Image (cartoon, rainbow, N blue to C red):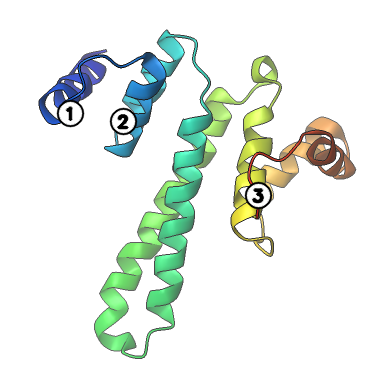
Amino acid sequence: MADLLTALFFLLQNIDLYVLDARDTSILLVRYGYIDEATSLALLFNQDLDIIFDSLVDKYLAALTTEQEDLTSKDRVSESSWASANKHRSASTLLSLQNYLERYDNAESNYRYRLEVVERILSRNGDFNLQPWITLHYLVCLHNMSGLFDKMRTSPPKYMY
């Protein structure tokens, strides 16, 4: 709770808005990198965690793109330390995404956050190879991969290509 108060105090010092609802405050916390605090606030006010997962997916894809650009740059020797740092960043963000899904995507949420993560990733890059741990969930819980495709067909996509 102390971390949440510190993050909110940071916002009060840096934002000229005086009245924010819980969702807007969570969005600002996410924007400034306070993911855990935004999650705590959203849970405290029974808000949807979609902005948390959207942010984690976007950070992961951005880090992965930067990593791939560094690896394909012409001056690989001077860029190697940057590529290493970006590889660590993408792996770290992916691990955070996996941990958040394990913690907050459950039967109570009807495992919809995993589906939203898959939708967001594929809407950004339709050829993306999904991590086995995210598709394995559907194989284990729904007993077949067609369950993933059925869920995606029956849920209207939030994001257009």
Q: Are marks 2 and 1 in contact (CB under 8 Å)?
A: yes
Task: Using the numbered discs, state the Cα–Cα distance from disc 2 to disc 1 in whole angstroms.
Answer: 9 Å
State whether residue 153 is above or below residue 75.
above
Residue 146 position (above or below residue 76): above
Where residue 137 appears, as percent x and y from the top left, is 73, 38
Residue 12: percent from left, percent from top: 15, 22
N-terminal-most mark, 2 or 3 = 2
Q: Earlier in the sequence, mark 2 or mark 1?
A: 1
SS under mark 2: helix
Q: Residues within 10 Å of mark 2 (few under 14, many from 20)?
A: some
Judged from this view, the residue extending furthest toward the top is: 45
Which residue is disc 2 drawn over? Answer: 28
Residue under numbered circle 1:
15
The amino acid on which the numbered mark 1 sits, given as a three-letter code, is Ile
Amino acid, disc 2: Leu
Residue 129 point in image, percent of width and height: 67, 61
Residue at x 79%, y 40% (from the top left corner): 152
Q: Which residue: 63% across, 45% down?
A: 159
* Secondary element at tag 3: loop
- Image quadrant in which the C terminus is located: bottom right
Residue neighbourhood size for the residue with mark 1, other residues' Cα within 10 Å, grouped as few (<14), some (14–19), many (≥20): few
- Residue drawn 41% across the image and 59% down it: 63
Image position of 22 (left or right of 97): left
Task: Kindly indicate the quadrant of the structure image that contains residue 82.
Answer: bottom left
Residue 160 is labelled as 3
Distance in Å between CA atoms under marks 2 and 3: 24 Å
Of label 3 and label 1, which has the lower sequence position?
A: 1
